[in-house]
Image (cartoon, rainbow, N blue to C red):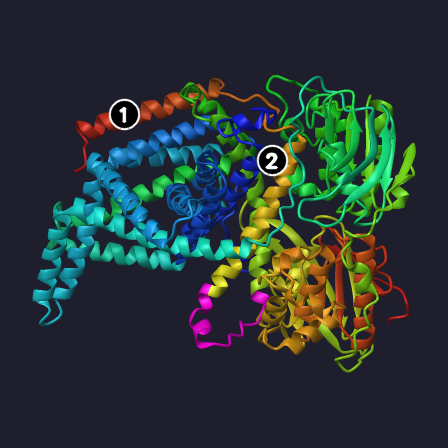
Amino acid sequence: MTGPTRQRAPVVLLRPVPGHTVIHRLWAGTKLIAVAGIGVLLTFYPGWVPIGLVAALILTTAWLAGIQRGTLPSIPRWLWILLFFGGATATFAGGSPFIDIGSVHLALGGLLSFLRITAVSIVLLGLGAMVSWTTNVAEIAPAVATLGRPLRPLRVPVDDWAVALALALRAFPMLIDEFRVLYAARRLRPKMVLTTRRQRRKRWALEVVDILATGITVALRRADEVGDAITARGGAGQISAVPSGPKRADWVALSIVIVMCAIAVTLELTVLGTL
Amino acid sequence: MTANEPSALRRAGSLQPVELAQASVMAALCAATAIIAVVVPFAAGVSLLGTVPMGLLAYRYRLRVLIAATVAGAVIAFLIAGMGGFMTVVDCAYIGGLTGVVKRRGRGIFTVFWAALVAGSLFGVLAVAALAILARLRHLIFDSVTANVNGLAAVIAHIPDMEPAAERLKHDFATALHYWPFLFFGWAVITIVIVTLIGWWALTRVMARLLGIPDVHKLDSSTDSGPIAPVPVRLHDVRFRYPKVDHDALGPVSLSVEPGEHVAVTGANGSGKTTLMLMLAGREPTAGTIERPGAVGLGKLGGTAVIMQHPESQVLGTRVSDDVVWGLPPGKSIDVHRLLGEVGLDGLAERDTGGLSGGELQRLAVAAALAREPSLLIADEVTSMVDQDGRDGLLSVLSGLTQHHRMSLVHITHYNSEADAADRVINLTGNGGAADNTEMVDTAAAPSATVPVAHHSAKPVLELDGVGHEYASGTPWATTALRDINFAVNEGDGLLIHGLNGSGKSTLAWIMAGLTVPTVGTCLLDGQPVSDQVGAVAISFQAARLQLMRSRVDLEVASAAGFSHRDYDRVVAALATVGLDPGLAHRRVDQLSGGQMRRVVLAGLLARSPRALILDEPLAGLDAASQDGLLRLLEELRRSAGLTVVVISHDFSGLEDLCPRTLHLHDGQLAAPTTAGGVS
């Protein structure tokens, strides 16, 4: 988004890691259900057992999908610094549990809380990353249409949503390219010459409005053209040439996720609860 | 699912084509801002801007459109930036929707404030309720933050005399947390109100700018009912005049298209070719009659199919095979592979449409049109944005169609050579009234030399030494765009860098302008890295509109050149350099033609006396007359003003005089350099 000038590993948008593994072949809907289910699990029971189980599941999935370390975007230094400070202050807070190693008396309560919430955030990010790294963009909208089918009798316009999602996914990379050019064009220009003091004070506001207006103008033009293209095809209808839906591997995957969630909740509520 | 509903039912029905298009593009825009806000450090403020596209949707369309856009944008943001992105889009839609609706009702800032207060309270109640239910998560978050605060207090307590302050901090925080429902409620109300007011301000400012934007959407869904039979069609003295215009865009025209016929329609810009397309596609003429045996059936099976100019916008699927079936009625199955084979795209069914060249995209559009087995196919200037190879391929596909299908083909083109394959050629003469002032532009006085003439001195301006570039280095997506590029551009040179789609020529242009730092090698401008001198080398992008950031021509030129817009003489001088009339100075940017936009960009760039000028596909999308005029202008500038010009293009035609030297770029590498025209 800020041009490819940085040398650190960039965030690659909406492109799956190359490969044809079991995970790549799973139906997109399965992955969305799994992510939603696990997300709910972690928001209700953010204990160490659920975190550990989900982390194990993510690592296994990553291994099955052949995701290498290079896939991860590099972690910026400021995030490390932030984590360090968070960890340090939490450590000083003390609190139970206490550990005695020789003469050193350690109070780990604060640090453990901090580590747990950090772990929850990382695991949730990892879940989302697994979906975007293994799913072809073209499969997402049809999956949403299928998943939303039960809502149709309630007059929820699921099909409209799926079509809008498919088109938005198609338009997204084009808009990102246009933003890159817009940003570059902005860099090429000299600093704005402002004649009055009032204008000078509002420099940033002027620039924001300039960029917003240009961006939206371009988007509106794009939308007009896309609207023409849809009209030329007689309106919306099919969005996918290949029928998609859950297969045997999907039922297996879903069962694994459900069993894992059940185990996590049971352990959390009985023997290994965190609180 | 059909677009064929009477307008009375429209408000209740599913989304119309225009609504769908607006919802999806604005959703993508909002998702992009949300993702930047989440992913880029310290850019959280960018998320405020996401309220503007959503506000615009709520202002212009019904609520259903906003909801569809929210779902689409939230899913995209989730896929890239996780829950944070998802929530940002939802918030943007909530606040943007609020401001948009208030604006549509014509109310002012007072209403917005109260509405924001109510909306904020609602949001606060929801947030508190959610936290009350998610007790474990709440405890975890509170424990963690408390630990941070207590730890900080413990550190502070070690500073002499600060112990009471530390104790106070600990105590106050614990008290505040005790009353957390009030804390969160208040926080929700205040942030929502502030963000809404900022969103309101931005929406107001942006909408003031958007007033002059012409609606470039052309096609309307066909509303006629009955059996579909668009041919034979007979036009008698048809005229068409756009609303609020004082001359006819077309006509009077009388013509007919018979079944199975291949008709070419030629004519200059402004002769009404595109308007004729609209007439054939079902729009009602202002005068005269159009006879058809049945309904037009735009986009319907056996009806009328239209292929338009812009390759990227009319391909709607992300995967090639999906695009072929896009929009077909549910249940209709077709042989995708046979259709792709017919247009010469065999084996590409699983490919991503994002990676196709312009020519391939247009052939895909033909396949999608053929999937509807149309009786009438209209191709409207389909080759104008396509390179020479793509053009040839596309024409051979088109010329075979009437033999293999029971259909009539109307091919609208401004190239006479493309009309040869047709059974019959109709030449629209037009009345010239709609033409922009290209003629005037061409005859404008030659620009005077502003820089001392320095013909072909051996002094290098730009030097590329061992330049190579790789995108996404170190990830599984790493792709090499350029390898071992060595060349120099001398003062006063005219250099053409020629390459096909995906040859890396745009990357090279960005490197030469200093916008991209190459992963290997150096690109020097006057001995210093060009990336340290962004702006010294001017670059004119293919999409000229993206380079025009101000609303009016004089503001734009002044801002791009770095002087005040009150300096009218300099604005006029800059416009004169590119052969534009001073009368254009007060014209709104969005009312310019494509050729004029490109010239305004050049005016701004040249006024800063750049060391070199890079032009990325300068002729794309321009009609023949504008191309010619622009080329002559550039030649003149190079010859008399000693301007160093580098053109990046997939085309040769007409560039020989401007660029005596040519470099061929193929798969990121330079082929043997060729020189012509006596430049060493």
Label 1, secondary structure: give it: helix
Q: Residue at horizontal 70%, vertical 75%?
A: B573
Tell me the quarter of the picture where residue A128 sits: top left
* Residue neighbourhood size for the residue with mark 2, other residues' Cα within 10 Å, grouped as few (<14), some (14–19), many (≥20): many
Q: Nearer the viewer, residue B534 or B578?
A: B578
Relative to A9, residue A273 above or below: above
Which chain does tag 2 point to?
B
**According to the image, label 2 marks what residue?**
B318
**According to the image, label 1 marks what residue?**
A263
Q: Is residue A191 magenta?
A: yes
Left or right: residue B363 versus residue B255 is left
Q: Which mark is residue B402?
A: none
Q: Residue farthest to the bottom?
A: B452
Question: What residue span does the magenta drawing correspond to?
Answer: A187-205
Label 2, secondary structure: give it: loop
Quadrant occupied by the N terminus of chain B: top right
Q: Is residue B608 visible?
A: no
Residue A240, given in percent of the width and then of the height, sits at: 59, 26
Q: Is residue B224 visible?
A: yes
Residue A47, given in percent of the width and then of the height, sits at: 23, 36
Q: Amino acid at mark 1?
A: Ile
Left or right: residue B631 versus residue B92 is right
Residue A38, given in percent of the width and then of the height, sits at: 34, 31
Left or right: residue B90 versus residue B458 is left
Tell me the quarter of the picture where residue B463 sits: bottom right
Residue A49, given in percent of the width and then of the height, sits at: 25, 34
Tell me the quarter of the picture where residue B17 sits: top right
Q: Nearer the viewer, residue A44 or B680?
A: A44
Q: Residue at horizontal 25%, vertical 33%?
A: A44
